[in-house]
Image (spheres, helix red, strand yellow):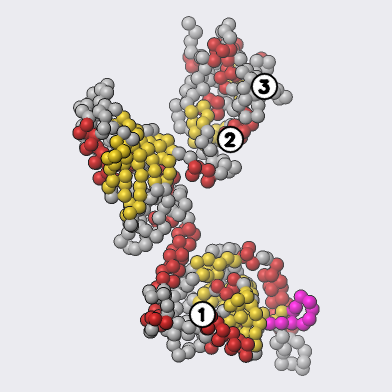
Amino acid sequence: TKGSPSEKQQPSAESQDELGQDDESPEKALTKVSAGRLIPMPGGAWAHVSCALWSSEVYESPKDGLVYALEKARSRGAKLKCFGCGRPGATVGCQRANCSYNYHFACAFACGAVFTAKQHILCTKHKSSVKGDLEPNVCVEHMRPFNLAPDGKSAVSSDSNLCYRLGSLVVHSLGRIEQDIDGFHSEQYITPPGYTATRIFWSYQAPKRRTVYVIKVNKEGTRPVFTIVAADASDTPITCKSMFDAYATLIDRVRQRNAFSLGSNFSHLPRIRTKEDKVYGLNAPQFFGFGLEQVRKSLETSPGIAAVAAPLSAESPAYKFCFAHPKKEEIKNLMRKRAAMAAEKALENPSGSARTEGMTAVDKSGGSGRITRALVRRADEEVQGGGRTSSGKGGRDLNDAKVETAIQAKYREMKSVPLEDRLVAKRSHIHGWGLFTKKDIRKNQMIIEYMGELLRFPVADRREKEYEQSGVGSCYMFRLDLERIVDATMVGCMARFMNHSCQNNAYAKVITVNTEAGMGQEKKIVVFANRDIKAESEITYDYKFPVEDGSLKCTCGAPNCIGRMN
């Protein structure tokens, strides 16, 4: 009887050949080869451990311990046929230059190929040129974990269409994370509505038999409802508001129908727990799947997971993440959206009409609630730039010329980058929509030009009356000089979404720039940064509204907020 490969310290090429052939046909030699256990691949595919590790492209990094290029080997092997069996999927290739022999792992072993200790394979034609030691444990099962490196080409979204198989539990749908309700998670578990799974467990209908249970999480008001339906007893479902109560009800029914074993490992009856140990046996979160590592990890990376990290109230529990925490920007965007929706809801009229509310609508707005043309945004107090002459004998001051040249260069630089690449309009926690930057902005850098229709004051007066009659309450007028106004109500850019803040990071200034057609100079309203602004920050400035008959409530939330905009 020949010894096993593990008993030989330095086997030769002839010894591996004898193990593979031994005067037998390759078909009989295949029965002696073990490719190892199956490991999962991205996209729902599976691969044997030995087939994966001996593929030509695959390598295991000594730094992080991850297995790389497995998907690349699978893609190449799908186009090649094995020189042993003639079937596609050959990923184990001969390492000799210009050799086109490719095998399956089992076929390579059966055909007499040799395996070296450096993860190289040589076919039968080139095995005589082998250098170094051979691998003694070619067919020995690798009893250690293998972690696959993430493949950048694989679509992450495709995993949402797959089922999770964890022992006798199959998760068919992870459900949807609730964004505006806190009742679907606790500190330990996330229980989203729409969660659906099936589990094989002891039946409470037929004794000594197992059946399939359908597990669902439904929505009833602001709380989850846990449902367990047996395949052989669909007319008696279990419905509870707690998964612990639902599991306890199921166990009681199973115990009433089945006789339990008191500790025998060989009994065909269900085994009863002999000690109250929290980590022993199956519990409610494990039965539903919420306590299993893979399900919990998938839930923590689900869309909208930021909602469980930002509770709606201080009394609501905040979920404690274990595997993946949402990004800060996702949490900030969610909080901005919630604040904007709350502000808009606070201004809603219960009767549906502001006329029937009387003074209630005025009280809600914190003042007159109407921004008229008397509160046109102002910037002419900070007029600078070209067009200002020196006090000398008619000659332009050298410093003014340098300032004008710098402003012209900054303006051309701002216009050279498309607006959508620099800024974006999103929901703001201050009010409605706000203007946010996509890139870092330096101090005194031009941010955006306030554009719209150029109107004279008489036309602006008439426009004001038309807007009031049509129900337009917001003012998007910006005074350019003492004779003209820029109206962005109907025609303009996203600069009109800038909100007021008592702790603003930008200021407006009227500058004079050269026209593109060379027809002289014209005034422009440009917003500058008054300090360094980080990307994803909201652009705010002081509206500089004068005091009218009533105050306009400010909701910027800054530490130095005075509570009004005028």
The answer to whether 564 is drawn above or below residue 4 in the figure is: below
Q: Which residue is mark 1?
A: 471
Mark 2 belongs to which amino acid?
Glu
Q: Range of the magenta residues? A: 514-523
Cβ atoms at labels 1 and 3 below 8 Å apart: no
Could you tell me the amino acid type at mark 1? Gly
Using the image as rendered, state which of residue 147 and residue 127 is in the foreground: 147
Q: Position of residue 270 (x, y in %)?
A: 26, 28
Secondary-structure class at tag 1: loop
Mark 2 vs mark 1: give the one in front.
1
Q: CA distance from mark 1 to mark 3?
A: 79 Å
Tell me the residue at 55%/29% (across/down): 52
Residue shown at 33%/51% (left/top)? 224
Kindly indicate the quadrant of the structure image that contains residue 524. bottom right
Q: Are marks 2 and 3 in contact (CB under 8 Å)?
A: no
Task: State the mark number for residue 101.
Answer: 3
Residue drawn where x is 44% and y is 85% of the image: 368
Left or right: residue 70 versus residue 262 is right
**Along the line of sight, which residue is nearer the eye, 421 or 447?**
421
The residue at which mark 2 appears reads as: 71
Q: Which numbered marker is on residue 242? A: none
- Residue 163, by quadrant, is top left
Which of the pair 219/15 is nearer the observer?
A: 219
**SS class of the residue under badge 3?**
loop
